Image (spheres, rainbow, N blue to C red):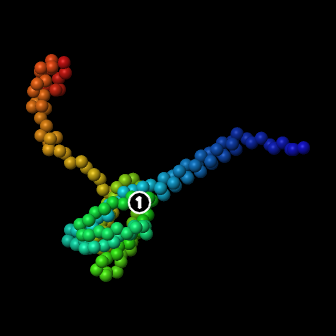
Amino acid sequence: MREKQPAKTPGKKMAIRGGLFLAWLLLGTLLFITGRGHTLLIDNRDFENIEAPDLITVYVDRGRGFEYFRGDRDRLTLVGSKHRILVEFSDGSPPFEGDFTLPIRDDMYLLSVPKIINGIEPFVEVFRTVPEPSAEEDEFDFNEDFEGFEDFGGSGDPAVTG
């Protein structure tokens, strides 16, 4: 016959459940950090008194190479935070190879090629898009735009209801 196994104590069950919960939490955090996607703008524009290279080929994480002329900017989508860049020059100069890290907190970053090849920090910056106000929004006048408001039972003042 089979022997009965001793019953697990409630404390032991809770410890096992807590350990499993912690393991799932750590796994989820690890997957979030390694799988976080970013948009990276590769910028080959002049920076202050440093002239951008004329024609370069940029490889990020040993992916497909992209050609940039001076003044070009293009975007890539990257996964993870640590990346490697290789810049090949069309004038025969030796290639530049370097590493960079993208923080987790933001979605879009700008990498300046002239800065990174000349060792100027920070060569990676957060890039935020801000919508420009249209000309119509700048010239909006409440008093002028609500002149006919009295015809509908209002006082003509948009701040007064009634």
As rendered, which of 75 and 102 lies closer to the eye? 75
Q: Can residue 121 be seen in this view?
A: no
- The percent coordinates of residue 64 (x first, y second) are 40, 67
- Quarter where residue 67 is shown: bottom left
**Compared to 95, does 121 lie above or below?**
above
Residue at the image position 81 percent from the left and 44 percent from the top: 5
As rendered, which of 85 and 64 lies closer to the eye? 64
Secondary structure under tag 1 reads strand
Residue at the image position 27 percent from the left and 52 percent from the top: 129
Residue at the image position 10 percent from the left and 27 percent from the top: 147
- The percent coordinates of residue 31 (x first, y second) are 51, 54
- Quarter where residue 7 is shown: top right
Residue type beneath disc 1: Leu
**Compared to 133, does 161 lie above or below?**
above
Residue extending furthest right? 1
- Residue 105 placement, left or right of 8: left
As rendered, which of 101 and 108 lies closer to the eye? 108
Q: Can residue 152 be seen in this view?
A: yes
**Compared to 16, does 101 lie above or below?**
below
Judging by the rendered image, the residue that carries numbered circle 1 is 78
